[in-house]
Amino acid sequence: MNLSLYVLTVLIWGTTWIAIKLQIGEVALAASITYRFALAALVLFAVLLLSRRLQRLDRRAQLLCMAQGLCLFSLNFLCFYTASQWIPSGLIAVVFSTATLWNALSARLVFRRQLAANVLAGGGLGLLGLALLFWPELAGHSASPETWLGLALALLGTLCFAAGNLLSSLQQQAGFRPLSTNAWGMFYGALLLGGYCLVSGTPLNFEWNQRYVGSLLYLAIPGSVIGFTAYLTLVGRLGQERAAYCTVLFPLVALNISAVLEGYQWTPLALGGLVLVMLGNLLVFRQPKNLSKAYYAR
């Protein structure tokens, strides 16, 4: 079951870049993200109400959902999309892949969980592998004040993502399922983004065409409803540090699709990076003998 959720998350989030590219047009990105999570929240609430599976959340859980909406469903996306204006997407992917290490650190600080050497080593290998994969893109980008601002925003977005993982872990430990907390979190995220659009003067226009509506539906339902539910379920079962290795594998799916659709060519350097990423994956999910089997069975 965990393997299926892991593969599902990687495949879905590794393909959302196609839909995101199709979203670029007359509608501002902040508005598009608002529509994405508003629609995702609507779908989740409808499914949960019809199936009578919507959990009643207490005040603490609602506050955590608000924080989760800020971290996972609004601020992090604004950071990444804004950063993409100044730094290459490959550099953003490398920064985002550090989520594995940030998640391991937060698990240590909050849950007093031992920092597993194999997770740290695997995360480091994955980070190095991504750097090799995107080296031509990184080497050809000159440093500038905008570059440093883009890096800062990408790091802030990654830290927000890691914080959202931690919040989901706290919710699941309290007995609240990701489906219910995601529905509320996406609702609050859309509310925050909508407020940002109004305050910043971002127009909330819409494109009624097949390209925009189709990509929005893909991002809202598979990309958000299914993708975030599968991923955060893994966070509860495997721990946020292991689940976050997905962030290293997303670019591999994207590059393989790019090879088919856009003519991306694998180089010896990129293949070396691929090997390091896969070795990192094996290390992250290797079960150390000194940890109980119960931890991995969650």
Image: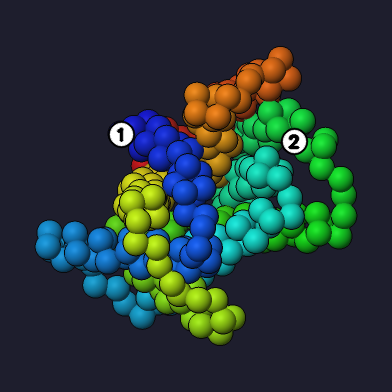
**Which quarter shows the N terminus?**
top left
Mark 2 lies on residue: 137
Which of 158/34 is in front? 34
Q: What residue sits 86% from the left and 45% below the top?
A: 142
Q: What residue sits 51% from the left and 58% below the top?
A: 25
- Relative image position of residue 10 (x, y in whole percent): 45, 36
Q: Quadrant of residue 176?
A: bottom left
Mark 1 lies on residue: 1
- Relative image position of residue 127 (x, y in whole percent): 69, 35
Instruction: Left or right? Give the position of 272 relative to 213.
Output: right
Which of 187/137 is in front? 137
Instruction: Left or right? Give the position of 133 relative to 167.
Output: right
Q: Secondary structure at mark 2?
A: helix
Q: Quadrant of residue 196?
A: bottom right
Disc 2 versus disc 1: distance between alpha carbons?
37 Å
- Relative image position of residue 255 (x, y in whole percent): 56, 30
